[in-house]
Image (cartoon, coloured by chain):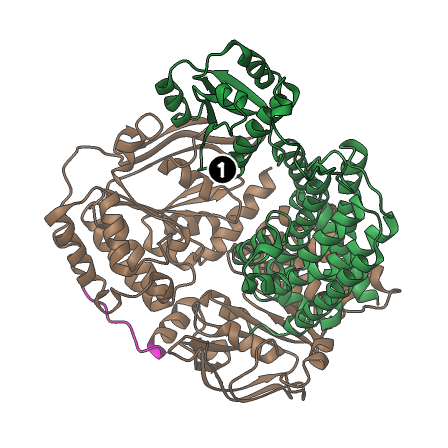
Amino acid sequence: MTVAIEIENLNYKFKNSKTFALKDICAKIKKGVITGIIGPDGSGKTTLLRSITGLLLPQGGSIKTFDFSPVEQQEKINKILGYMPQKFGLYEDLSVEENLELYAQLKELPEENREQTFEKLYRFTNLDPFKKRLAGKLSGGMKQKLGLACALLGKPDLLVLDEPSVGVDPISRKELMNMVRELSSGDTTTIWSTAYMDEAQSFDFCIVLNGGEIIYNGTPSGLGSDTKTFENRVIELMGGYKERKTPLADDFVLKETGVDCPVSAIGLEKKYGDFYAVKNNTFCIQKGEIFGLLGPNGAGKSTSFKMMCGLITPSAGKAEIMGVDIVKNPSKARSFIGYMAQKFSLYGNLDVLGNLDFFASIYGLSGKKKEKEIKKVIETFELEPFLKQDTKELPLGFKQRLALACAIMHKPPVLFLDEPTSGVDPIARKEFWSHIKALSKKGVTTMVTTHFMDEARYCDRISLFYNGETIAIGTVEELIKSAQVNTMEEAFCVLIERSKMNE
Amino acid sequence: MSRLFALIKKEFFQITRDPSSVMIAFIMPLMLLIIYMYGVNLDTSRVKLGLKFEDTSPELSTLMESFSKSKFVRARIYQDRKLMYKDLISGKINGFVIIPNDFLKNIQRKRAADVQIVTDGSEVNLSNYVKSYPMSIISQWVSESSYKYNFQKPILQAQIRYWYNQDINSHHFILPGSLAITMTLIGMLLTTLVLAREWERGTMEALLSTHVRRSDIFLSKYIPYFILGMLSMSFNVFVCVKIFKIPFYGSYIVLFGVCALFLFSALGIGLLISSNFKDQFLASQTALSIGFLPALMLSGLTFPIDSMPEILQNITKIIPTRYFVAFIQSEFLAGTVWEIVLINSIFLIFLGTICAFLVYKNIKTRVE
């Protein structure tokens, strides 16, 4: 097998940053196969891809992309390149058809076989019925397919996909992989970056990045034949994770209330026009239970979540927190909740201490008690060295810790976590879950949404969401059993397929 | 060429589907024109004046009548000084005139007669009118009264005519001038967002990895917004001339020719700002503070350039709106004066070219 891309001692450092985004990267990427670049957010994946395509100039070292230098011969690389940036690079105010046509013209596809190419792409992406729809109105999975279709125009020799599967459910991810395999001709070299460890198995080769350095380069099976062993090996390579008891839950005492179902929904519904975002959703989360909401994008997870917090008023049904109706008595019901929003919603311009202080105050802590709680979370989450740093500059893993710290300072009996682990490295995720487990043992009731199928194992019960409805509910084992498969991921796909058939 | 054509087509799709560009190009100018037409008025309407006659001679009743008949003042007779002071403080009157005890006596004796005028100095412009209107009313009255022979005729008698704006209607020069401001706003606002938007939405990265050249991006950002700007200009001129009936003495060909040059430089400034930012919010804030505000203050429309300190006068030289204001006012009121047209055009071409050059240099073909 010949080498497509040769990277030697590549270095890159962002302006105003103390650490290297890429540090002495050496790698050879082979021709005609799919190579995965795997790593958590901020590990240097995008910087590496951009350096390969010539979108970024390296500050040290050299790259040869198909015998071209990205520094001097960017135009030549562009002739053989299909590139899909993060956020897909689509014009949201242009229709599916117009986006494809635009990119076909920009890539100077010959007029005569354009129609043919389009037809083939429409067939594969199932976008044919949506030709006239604006790209901005497509679902995440469809956008991603369209983005890929645009990148595939002109049969590129080199296909570079920057996190094509971010925020997309396992089914769409599988479809995407199949598309790449089938549509890229046998000798297309594909580079695919991702933050999901579980995707690694589908690549021919993988390069695992951490903190700007390569920690593994080889076949995925070299690290492990399933996601769990793969991840554990990665954690080992990152320096290992030491299980330790978290002091967080030590003096966490909840008032006895006698409420059996701290979080309950009865016939919860949300209707937009004649479209049901959430349909007849009923569940009851027991005290101390970790309850996971799983489902593809647009299934109604976020809507349910927001109705439970009182951020969206339900069209019908009711939601109760500690027996208090969130619509009738929102401020009382909310005082029981610790809420961690998607993307953490911290104040980027405040320093860490400022954020802690602010959130402690809005959750009603003051004086000595506030000081004590802040001091405690600083110790537990090891935030001491960052206290004076602006929050927006924190590494993602620390942002996540800080967000959790902010959510639990007032010792809420109920925790709502909306995609708390997206983009965070595996060690930080493990740590995070150890805190949640400890809190759950003390009787804190947790509702959590996640895209990581492997995180389902931390949950006591799972509710599988599809098309606004709960299609399955139970423990991981129960779900896997009812789908008659081996892993949660397979169970997810099977159960959703089954629900599609029933329609 | 096909790449450029594709990009321009895309840009037009985006313009027609984005209500905000239609707002900026047509609704906002209409609002501004309406405000300038009905809201801004530099001609002072009637000055509110307090009057106190301490001289109670019956002959002065005709003077009183002159005041009440005047179309420049709205006089109110006071008996009580204190009440008059109070009304001045509360702003019910803009100033007052006191005719003293010996007023008529002095006139009869051919002596200079005193009149006391007090005005509200916090409004400088208005207080000038408060000063001059009563003076002229009183002198008019004297010259028509039986005492007119008691005084010499003034040596000079000015016969004033207002050229180019016979009725001294300030709308006739404010509205054309406001067109220049509006076009600045359109030129800058439309374009400040377009490059920053591509970066923010991640589409620039996708563009840069196709066969697109720097010149394609450059031209695809100028041409569509230039066309939109010219359409907006036609709409504005139509509203001014046909609906608000502002007289137009110039040539439409020259007007639109110079407007094209002006748009070239205004779009250039907008794009220059945009090419320096990857964030729409920052770009629009910058456009407002370094593009639009100076254009409004220093273009010579609201404050005459000649009375600015020298440093500011020099700064105005790099503001394209200044040249366009000067041109458009003379084109509307005085017709085509080639000297004015040429000088201003040369400056606009010069500024536009510099901007275009900088924009071209500034369009990045890489992410960093």
Indicate left or right for B116 with A173 as reference. left
Chain assigned brown: A
Q: Is residue A82 magenta?
A: no
Q: Is residue A204 visible?
A: no
Indicate left or right for B158 with A143 as reference. right
- Who is closer to the viewer here, A99 or B342? B342
Q: Quadrant of residue B175?
A: top right
- What amino acid is found at the position of numbered circle 1 in the picture? Glu
Q: Point out residue B177 in the picture as x, y percentages from the top left corner.
A: 69, 46
From the image, tell me which residue sits under label 1: A469
Q: Residue furthest front?
A: B109
State which region is magenta. A236-244
Q: Is residue A134 visible?
A: yes
Residue that appears at 78% across and 50% down = B230
Identify the element where label 1 is drawn: strand
- Who is closer to the viewer here, A279 or A338? A338
Residue that appears at 26% across and 50% down = A358
Position of the C terminus of chain B, as image quadrant, is: bottom right
Chain B: what color?
green
Name the magenta segment's main secondary structure: loop
- Who is closer to the viewer here, B137 or A59? B137
Give the answer, above or below, for where B205 lies relative to A466.
below
Indicate left or right for B364 with B91 as reference. right
Q: Point out residue B250 in the picture as x, y percentages from the top left corner.
A: 85, 47
